[in-house]
Amino acid sequence: MKILVTGGLGFIGSHLVSRLLQEGHAVICLDNGYTGREENVQAHRDNPAFTLLWHDVAEPLPPELEKAGIEQIYHLACPASPPHYQADPIHTIRTGVWGTYHLLELAQKTGSRFLLASTSEVYGDPQVHPQPEDYWGHVNPIGPRACYDESKRLAETLTFDWQRQHQTEIRVARIFNTYGPAMREDDGRVVSNFIVQALRRDPLTVYGDGSQTRSFCYIADLIEGLVRLMNGPYPGPFNLGNPQEFTILELAQQVLALTGSPSPIVHRPLPTDDPKQRRPDIRKARTLLGWDPQIPLQVGLELTIPYFRRRLGLE
């Protein structure tokens, strides 16, 4: 098939591009390079089945895409870590809302199936644990995280309304914390923060007392879930994440043990609206998609740490 991946230079997007090319598809990677890196797809630049198109999805799409023979659209384009989406919150909102509008419009015109990469942040600081898909969330609509949380919530609304109004085939994935090679070392996510700090022998920064929990899904497991969702018959939404739950302090201790770092742990105040707990209920994905993450946290960290050693020039 001819498949469009927006945000294809990013962490998740570049892994998805590689998977789709390996399956024999032709892939158009659309990205503006805001947080994605061209080096993530460097191995595909000479592949005739790969096309890189520089564009910001917040702006109207190039008209040539309507005649490109696209059959599926994976819409991942959006800064996803707090430092990046808070750096320009208005553009984050435009990307989340107008970007989704433009891609849904393209899906309607081309008859493509459309997958929205939504987020566990639609649940906010949840009062239900673990979070099932029918939980409506607990989100501060005017806080510093709202530009991302609420734009993703509205993107979901827009996607389902587009299906109801235009009968466009849609799929919606709510992605929980994901990690692995190709993450940016400066993206502000907790896994990359801890690994980089440990390798540099800097103190590991834990916000609050470290008792807040997260669930960490290795990138290969997530990509499998996205592909199954896109090619299955169900619109979703589906939680995609690893249901194993760890405190932030437990994660810090695992990273220190696996890197052999002598770094101390330092505590800082919790950021505003930081969720106290986060764990996906994935019974729906297990039942309808046959999807279940296979890679435990320790194994995933062992696969990820060497990548950061190379990035930091510490091999």
Image: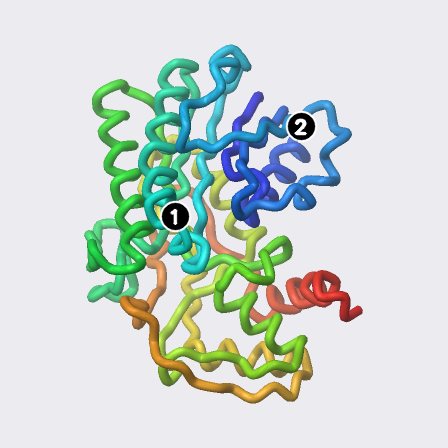
Residue bearing the label numbered 1: 285
Q: CA distance from mark 1 to mark 2?
A: 30 Å
Is residue 284 placed above or below 17 in the rendered structure? below
**Mark 2 burial class by Cα count in 10 Å: few <14, some 14-19, many 20+:** many
Q: Which mark is residue 50?
A: 2
Q: Which numbered disc flags the more N-terminal residue, 1 or 2?
A: 2
Determine contact: label 1, label 2, CB under 8 Å: no
In terms of depth relative to the viewer, which is nearer, 278 or 76? 76
Percent of width and height locating residue 48: 73, 23
In terms of depth relative to the viewer, which is nearer, 210 or 258? 210
Can residue 157 be seen here? The reply is: yes
Amino acid marked by disc 1: Ala
Please, what secondary structure does the residue beneath circle 2 have?
strand
Mark nearer the viewer, 1 or 2: 2
Q: Residue 167 occupies which quadrant of the picture?
A: top left
Is residue 89 placed above or below 73 in the rendered structure? below
Please, what secondary structure does the residue beneath circle 1 have?
helix
Percent of width and height locating residue 282: 37, 54
Residue at 62% x, 78% y is 198
Is residue 119 placed above or below 277 in the rendered structure? above
Q: Residue furthest right?
A: 315
Residue at 57% x, 30% y is 54
Can you say which quadrant of the picture contains the C terminus? bottom right
Percent of width and height locating residue 188: 49, 64
Q: How is the image coloured?
A: rainbow
